[in-house]
Image (cartoon, helix red, strand yellow):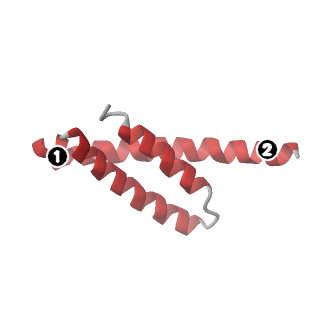
């Protein structure tokens, strides 16, 4: 269950980022949320007890899933707008 948290968090970050119009604000919000969720994932899984270096794995997981989710959300939004 601990390994699902970064993936779900990435989806949440991607969906939030897709709703922000300003590129600068979108990147700042996505970066802050990615770091916060990755740190939380590292703590939840207990990896922090071994080494804080595991946070980089969680940052990567959250960021990649967020980027994919943002891309899909943007694509779907454009398709819906075109069909109207």
* Residue at image location 88% in from the left, 46% down from the top: 84
| Quadrant hosting residue 64 | top left
Residue linked to disc 2:
80
Residue linked to disc 1:
48
Q: Is 44 above or below relative to 16?
A: above
Measured as percent of width and height from the top left, residue 42 is found at 25, 45
How packed mark 1 is, by other alpha carbons closer than 10 Å (few <14, some 14-19, many 20 or more), is some
* Residue sitting farthest toward the top: 1
* Residue at image location 61% in from the left, 67% down from the top: 22
Measured as percent of width and height from the top left, residue 20 is found at 60, 62
Marking on residue 30: none
Q: Quadrant of the N terminus?
A: top left
Q: Is 3 above or below relative to 33?
A: above
* Residue sitting farthest toward the right: 84
Measured as percent of width and height from the top left, residue 33 is found at 41, 57
Tell me the SS state at disc 2. Answer: helix
Q: Seen in the image, is 65 located left or right of residue 49?
A: right
How packed mark 2 is, by other alpha carbons closer than 10 Å (few <14, some 14-19, many 20 or more), is few
All told, the count of numbered labels is: 2
Q: Earlier in the sequence, mark 1 or mark 2?
A: 1
Tell me the SS state at disc 1. Answer: helix
Q: Is 82 above or below relative to 26?
A: above
* Residue at image location 19% in from the left, 47% down from the top: 53
Give the CA separation, mark 1 to mark 2: 43 Å
| Quadrant hosting residue 50 | top left
């Amino acid at each position: 269950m601990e390994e699902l948290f970064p993936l779900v968090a990435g989806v949440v970050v991607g969906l939030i980022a897709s709703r922000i119009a300003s590129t600068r604000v979108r990147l700042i919000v996505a970066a802050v949320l990615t770091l916060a969720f990755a740190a939380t994932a590292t703590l939840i899984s207990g990896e922090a007890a071994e080494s804080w270096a595991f946070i980089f794995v969680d940052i990567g997981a959250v960021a990649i899933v967020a980027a994919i989710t943002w891309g899909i959300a943007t694509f779907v939004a454009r398709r819906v707008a075109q069909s109207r």
